[in-house]
Image: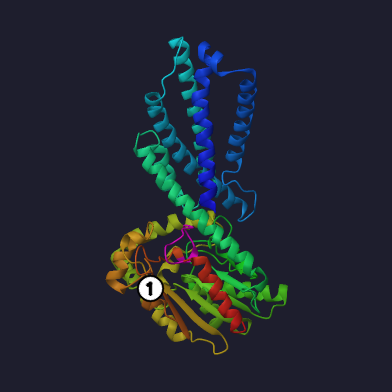
Amino acid sequence: MDHIRKIISALILFAEMSILYILIPCITDPVLRQAAFTPDRTTAAVMACIVGFLLFLFINLFPRLTLRRTAGRRNRILEDGAALLQLFIATAIAESLFVIVYPFFIKLNVSDNTAYGFGRLLSILLLVLMESVLFWNGIIRVYATSVQLGVKWRVIGIVCGWIPLLNILVLCRIISITANEAAFEKEKYLLDQVRAESRLCETKYPLLMVHGVFFRDFRFFNYWGRIPHALKQNGAVIYYGSQQSAASVADCGQELAERIRSIIQETGCEKVNIIAHSKGGLDSRYAISACGVSPYVASLTTINTPHRGCIFADYLLEKIPEKVQKSVARKYNAALKKFGDADPDFLSAVRDLTASACECRNETLPNCPDVYYQSVGTKMNCAISGRFPLNMAYPLVKHFDGANDGLVSLESAVWGEDFISLAVPEGRGISHGDMIDLNRENICGFDVREFYVNLVRDLKERGF
């Protein structure tokens, strides 16, 4: 149905522009004007121009020829923007061919070549103006609302926009990216509408989402991307760990324990379900096993957590001179203070991620029998699968630890009663950052938001 609407829109616009291309030269030439425009025809032409203008305005406002709400506001703007760019490409090509071919098939009795030439130039300028309105209306919409374009394609679009032919190829790529994004988000929107009453993620106990190292929850950065919104759409109640971004596992574990107690006291919810990413999983295990909050935790799900550490971290700490380590640490600590950490300790955080440190901690921190433990691990398929710096770390981690997500090996991520291994057979794979929707990227073969919805739905079915 959407394709039919777009075809109708393109045909309407092509008809309008073609009529104007024929009409304006006839108006400017005295002989053609006298022969073509009787009073009745003049009235009809004026009415046609008014109707054409209103149709052009309507199509620019509603390019899909529908007022029905089938997605969120941002996605409707994105979908309309992609449709406008598709109309621009279609009508620009069709009009260019029409302008070239038309003089060879139509022979007119022109009395004044100067007047007729001026009229033809005026009609071409009007066509360019109308196409410009379509293009800028569409490009502004997609640039303002698209997530998948990222910085890369926005910059490419601006740079290549001035290079003939290449600008058309880049525009086609932008249209493809944004149209696919709009279709994907529309499908998710409709899915959430259908299952809203089911409240799939309305667990018995609320969720406590715990961030990893060198990031905070919400103070300056949305750590979990689009995931919390998807969970809330399906009934979840969410809290955040809010522990320091760079500190030892013990210090962060103490902070998490206090956070859990405060949630229990404020809400009376009895327990929480912890979903922790990366080092956050180690912090959570410490809080449960060493800080006395196991009675208040129903389950712990760790996402890409280095339970057995990272061998490459041991290697780097051994090879990098202590003076350099302290210099890097001072710079990181200064930056992390500005992001909300009261007392950041970069080196303690890094050392607690080594294989040797994790081995010692695993011996002294047994799982609590009343808490359900499960874990998730992913892997990248190649170095270019991840964004910087994961693309650089991947080969190093693979050399020391094997299959990995750019930071954590699959083997190290295993913990608890159940382990979920995620991979896609082709393409980029699933990186450490992808599991928190770091780049807000829709990955072919893996929907991170739907994964978390199903993960929490499973916790609900288990009675947590």
Quadrant for residue 233, please give it: bottom right
Residue found at x 49% / y 75%: 302
Compared with 382, 272 (above or below) is: below
Task: Give 343 or 409, whichever is nearer the viewer.
Answer: 409
Chosen colour scheme: rainbow
Q: Is 63 part of what is drawn in magenta?
A: no
SS category of the residue bearing label 1: loop
- Specify the quadrant that holds the N terminus: bottom right
Residue 380 visible from this viewpoint: yes
Query: In the image, what residue type sits under mark 1?
Result: Thr
In the image, 37: left or right of 267?
A: left
Residue stretch in magenta: 435-446
In the image, 313: left or right of 441?
A: left
- Specify the quadrant that holds the C terminus: bottom right
Task: Give 311 or 300, whichever is nearer the viewer.
Answer: 300
- Residue 62: x percent and y percent? 60, 43
Q: List the residue tagged with mark 1.
A: 354
Compared with 262, 164 (above or below) is: above
- Residue 97: x percent and y percent? 39, 32
Residue found at x 49% / y 58%: 440
- Residue 452: x percent and y percent? 53, 71
